[in-house]
Image (cartoon, helix red, strand yellow):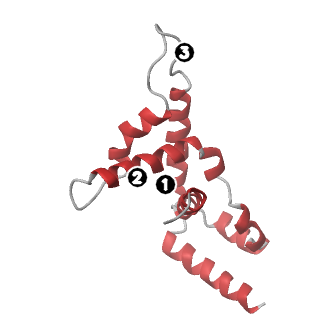
Amino acid sequence: MASELDRKRYLHLTVCLLPRCNRDMMEILFVFLKWVASFSHVDEETGSKMDLENLATVITPSILYSKTGEPGPAESFKSIKAVSQLLHCQDEFYTVPDELLPYLDPNIVDFFEKNPELPPKDMLKTCSKVRRTLICL
């Protein structure tokens, strides 16, 4: 079973692999939701009860859903936990992971900046080529 730190790392890497337009949309939506949650429990009259956990519970079925039918309780709980973690750690998840920084060749960074709409399949091919090059060094 993966540790909490490993799960967080896997989630971070998964966010990094999303197509740029999806990452951008997720960032905009989640920044907005974090702002909405900042008004939770302001006071009894004006505050809402929609903190990050409640927002994650409400939006998870809309953004993470099972294509095979109704998810079981365990699957639903894991999905809500993942979305909650995405909401809580969003500033961290929208940056390049520290363990990948040494592998970023300026030419590769330029390549991805010049090709922002690169499909994930092509991105993975390029990353595999870079990895093979690094292994040979």
Q: Which residue occupies the extreme front position in the image?
A: 1
- As measured in the structure, the alpha-carbon distance from the residue carrying label 2 to the one carrying label 1 is 21 Å
Say what secondary structure mark 3 lies in.
Answer: loop
Mark 3 residue type: Val
Residue 78 is marked as: 2
Q: Position of residue 114 (x, y in %)?
A: 66, 66
- Please state which of the two labelled residues, at mark 3 or mark 2, is closer to the viewer: 2
| Residue at numbered disc 1 | 22
- As measured in the structure, the alpha-carbon distance from the residue carrying label 3 to the one carrying label 2 is 29 Å
Label 2 close to label 1 by CB (< 8 Å): no
Residue 56 is marked as: none
- As measured in the structure, the alpha-carbon distance from the residue carrying label 1 to the one carrying label 3 is 32 Å
Question: At x 53% / y 21%, what residue is drawn?
Answer: 39
Task: Report whether 100 appears left or right of 6.
Answer: right
Depth check, front residue: 68 or 20: 68
Mark 2 residue type: Lys
Depth check, front residue: 137 or 111: 137
| Residue at numbered disc 3 | 42
Q: Position of residue 93 (x, y in %)?
A: 61, 52
Q: If you read the primary sequence from the N terminus, does the residue marked by circle 3 or circle 2 appear first?
A: 3
**Residue 87 versus residue 70 in the image, above or below:** above
Question: At x 55% / y 45%, what residue is drawn?
Answer: 27
Q: Quadrant of the C terminus?
A: bottom right
Q: If you read the primary sequence from the N terminus, does the residue marked by circle 2 or circle 1 appear first?
A: 1
Q: Position of residue 45 (x, y in %)?
A: 46, 7
Q: Which residue occupies the extreme left position in the image?
A: 69
Q: Position of residue 136 (x, y in %)?
A: 74, 92
